Every structure is written in C-alpha cells, then in structure tokens.
C-alpha cells in the first residue's frame, strides 16, 4: 500500500461544485497526503465514500463482511426525499437530490433514478391539518411543495390511488432509485479509480495506539491503515464500543414486499402520516412496499430472524390494496425484513470522533440514509481527508446523545 505519499490525481472536477462537470472537464488536482484509508461497510454510505476518496487519489480499501448492498442499502424502499425532512437533515437531502439528478452520468451506470415526486396521503379528515403543515414547513424551508385538496386533485397525478383520499402533500422534486444498482455503481466507479473493494471480509476490530487508528483486524488478517471510516449500519456499535465510543440506538425490523412487474401506474413514492406504510413502483414495473417496524433483538442477522411477522405483512398488504386497489390481483414475488438503526432523535451520527484520531463514523440513519448516501460519501471523504466538511454536520455529533435513551415509539422523520 502507498502510505504518506503526496501524488497527483486526475480529478473529474473541483470537490464541491454542484452540479459537478462530470466527464466533461478534467484538470489536475493535488491529492491530499492522506492515504491508506479503510472503509468498513459496503452499503451506500461506504461505497459512496470509497468513490469520493478513490477519485481524489486516496489509497482506499473497502471491507464488506457479506455482499455489497447486503443489508439496509439492499433492503431499503430507496425513496429519495427532501419533503418531510427534519430541518437538520434538509441541507444534506437537498444537496443529495442535486447529486441524484446526475448520478447515473457521474457513475457511468443507470441507477434508475426517477424524479417522480412524493405524495404523503391524508387518509382521514383529521390528517389534513398534519399534511398541510408538512407542506407549509417544506415551503418555509424553500422546498416546492403543494397541498392537493381532495381525491380529484390527487388523481390528476396519481390515477391509480384510492378514490376516497382526503388529500396529499406533493413534492415533485422527490423520487426514488434502484438501491442495488446504485451501490454497485458506486463500487464499480470506485474500483475504476483504484479502490480495493473486498466482499466476504469481516472487520473484527479497529486497532489504535492509544489515540490514533493504526489498522483493522479482519477475518483474513490484519490491515494497517491511517484512517478508518465506520459505515457499518446496525453493526457499528460492536466496532465502536470496544473503543469506548457508545452510540445509543435500537434496531427495528421493517417488513418489505415486492410484487411481479405490472404496467406503469404510479410514478410517486407514497407515504402516510403515521409512517406505517410506504410504497413505490420500481423502474422495472415491480412494486416495493414497506410497513411498520417492530423491535429486533438478535445479535447477528440471519435469513430467518430478519423476516417480518405475519401481522406486519398483513398490515402492509392491507395498506397496499387499500391505497392502490389495482394491486389486489397482483402477485407478491418476494418478502423480506430490513433492519433499521434508530437513534433517540432519529438523526444519524456523522463525525470524525474526538476520542480517536483517524476514526470517522456514519451510522444511525434511522430509516432515511439512502437518499443522503451520495452526500454522506462526500462528508465521510472530507472528514477522512481534511478533518472537516463544508456540509452542516454539527447536529449529527455523537455528543448530543450522551445519556440519551431510545424512547419506545420514536417518530421517524422519513
Ligand atoms: C425497509 C427499509 C426501508 C427504507 N427506506 C428508505 C427510504 O425510502 N429512503 C431512505 O433514504 N432510506 C431508507 N431506508 C434507510 C436506508 O436504507 C439506510 O439508512 C441506508 O441504506 C444505510 O446505508 P449504510 O451504507 O449506512 O448502511 P448498510 O446499508 O446497512 O451498510 C452497512 C454494511 O456494513 C457491513 N458491515 C457491518 N459490520 C461489518 C464488519 N464488521 N466488517 C465488514 N462489513 C461490515 C454490513 O454487512 C453492511 O453491508 C430504509 C431502510 C429499510 C431497512
């Protein structure tokens, strides 16, 4: 491995122009003198960070214990949404959407991003005030959103929906993408730029010499390095706890159902006020539908213990056919459960840790980290390379959670 060297790299643009001049303008940029960075985790956060680092000439190795997108980044609904975001996350979500709009071009692979909008449905008259507030908050934050009053207005843009809706919030600039393709595209782009991406390698521990990271121990041996990025989703605590870094989150399991492909009928991502159902039609015609979470307490995930309960599936199916009646005759082709890393305030922890130099963490996305992925990658690379970032991440410092415990029913912001 090259370590401690300053070298010049061909860079597809300045680090922070938006949109970046992908593919069209190239110039030489002095690569930072940081090298040998290990990323733990091959989900969207880790692979996006690998791409950012590799294209800036940093020597990076990504280690994934299973397969790429094998956990949350594959289980996800994969909505890409600014509307309804917590104000602290909104700048990241807005920056992410700008990246998503050009991501296929940037990565040289179709990630099936569709900017079809997001509808949060008012189902009962009592929901109207809540949904109107979502619109008012969005508009106040500069997001173009409208309230669609009555089923007729909703049907103008989403004719497949139930005719008895009270109304909906509509954000036309939200969308969705293919999560597997996105992660694979980030990883492939990173590899083309020199990243070493290894699957089936588990990191067993992070090695330090007191205050600094010096390497990682893995299922295939020890790997020395100067920086470690922990993008390990629900398993981040088992890597961080031994270093005295405690992130209080609980893990819940969410049901997901996928259908056979049917003719295009829904361009938007759907949500409901309680957050107990969401759904979308994928670019390939299949529906992906998710429901309410329940606690998950196993220590390691297996094919069986992440499967949803029958009552979770029943409720998700009931919402699906109530909201999209045409789904009644459509076959389900896959069922799975997805684990979510839920913090007390439903916001992530993203920081260069104050306790250990060279250690950068991103976890606790609480069910809405897919949208943020491209920007999370930028932030993680910034923190590893420079120790700081232009993105506003102060609200995501771990210290805010000191002494916090996770309430039974956290209201997710996404
Ligand atoms: C059902 C469901 C629906 C969702 N819907 C949305 C949505 O609509 N929009 C949205 O924005 N977000 C959504 N999310 C959340 C989003 O998917 C996640 O926040 C995001 O994918 C997290 O990405 P990540 O890369 O940080 O973590 P993960 O994708 O979980 O990746 C972590 C990786 O680290 C690996 N790993 C862990 N420990 C080790 C180790 N010791 N050594 C090596 N590798 C290790 C794991 O195997 C895993 O692949 C949803 C999540 C679920 C489960």
Image: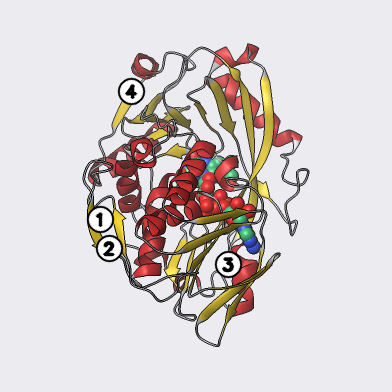
Seen at 47% across and 41% down, the residue is 185
Q: Tell me how far mark 1 sits from mark 3, CA to CA.
A: 32 Å
Residue behind mark 1: 16
Foreground: disc 4 or disc 1: 1
Question: In the visual, does 308 lie left or right of 270?
Answer: right
Residue behind mark 2: 390
Q: Position of residue 313 (x, y in %)?
A: 69, 32
Residue at mark 3: C-beta within 8 A of ligand 1? no
Q: Earlier in the sequence, mark 2 or mark 3?
A: 3
Find numbered disc 1 in the image and state the secondary structure of the residue it sits on: loop
Q: Where is residue 80 in the image (x, y as percent from the top left)?
A: 41, 39
Q: Which of marks 1 and 3 is nearer the N terminus?
A: 1
Q: Earlier in the sequence, mark 1 or mark 2?
A: 1
Question: In the visual, does 160 lie left or right of 245?
Answer: left
In the image, which disc is placed on residue 248?
3
Are the residues flagged by discs 1 and 3 in contact, CB closer than 8 Å? no
Say whether residue 71 is visible.
Answer: yes
Foreground: disc 4 or disc 2: 2
Q: Earlier in the sequence, mark 4 or mark 2?
A: 4
Give the camera-side residue of 223 and 234. 223
Foreground: disc 1 or disc 2: 1
Foreground: disc 1 or disc 3: 1
């Amino acid at each position: 491995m090259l370590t401690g060297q300053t070298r010049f790299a061909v860079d597809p643009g300045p680090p922070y122009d938006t949109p970046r001049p992908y593919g069209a303008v190239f110039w030489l940029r002095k690569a930072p003198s940081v090298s040998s960075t290990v990323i733990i985790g091959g989900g969207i956060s880790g692979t996006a960070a690998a791409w950012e680092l590799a294209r800036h000439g940093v020597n990076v190795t990504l280690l994934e214990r299973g397969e790429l997108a094998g956990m949350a980044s594959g289980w996800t609904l994969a909505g890409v949404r600014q509307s309804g975001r917590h104000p602290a996350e909104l700048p990241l979500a807005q920056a992410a959407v700008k990246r998503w709009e050009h991501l296929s071009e940037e990565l040289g692979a179709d990630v099936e991003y569709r900017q079809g909008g997001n509808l949060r449905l008012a189902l009962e008259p009592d929901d109207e005030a809540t949904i109107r507030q979502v619109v008012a908050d969005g508009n106040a934050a500069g997001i173009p959103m409208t309230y669609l009053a009555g089923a007729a207005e909703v049907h103008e843009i989403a004719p497949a929906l139930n005719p008895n809706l009270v109304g909906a919030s509509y954000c036309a600039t939200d969308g969705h993408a293919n999560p597997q393709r996105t992660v694979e595209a980030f990883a492939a782009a990173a590899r083309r730029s020199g990243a070493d991406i290894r699957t089936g390698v588990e990191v067993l521990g992070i090695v330090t010499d007191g205050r600094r990271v010096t390497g990682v121990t893995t299922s295939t041996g020890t790997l020395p390095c100067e920086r470690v990025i922990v993008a390990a989703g629900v398993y981040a605590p088992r890597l961080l706890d031994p270093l005295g870094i405690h992130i209080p989150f609980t893990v819940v399991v969410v049901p997901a159902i996928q259908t056979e492909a049917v003719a295009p009928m829904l361009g938007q991502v759907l949500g409901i006020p309680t957050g107990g159902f969401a759904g979308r039609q994928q670019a390939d015609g299949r529906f992906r539908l998710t429901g309410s979470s329940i606690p998950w307490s196993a220590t390691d995930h297996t094919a069986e213990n992440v499967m949803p309960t029958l009552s979770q599936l029943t409720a998700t199916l009931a919402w699906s056919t109530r909201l999209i009646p045409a789904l009644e005759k459509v076959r389900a082709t896959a069922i799975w459960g997805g684990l979510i890393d839920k913090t007390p305030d439903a916001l992530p922890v993203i920081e260069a840790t104050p306790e250990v130099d060279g250690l950068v963490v991103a976890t606790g996305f609480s069910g809405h980290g897919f949208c943020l992925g491209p920007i999370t990658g930028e932030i993680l690379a910034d923190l590893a390379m420079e120790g700081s970032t232009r993105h506003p991440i102060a609200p995501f410092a771990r210290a805010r959670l000191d002494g916090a415990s996770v309430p039974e029913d956290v209201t997710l912001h996404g």
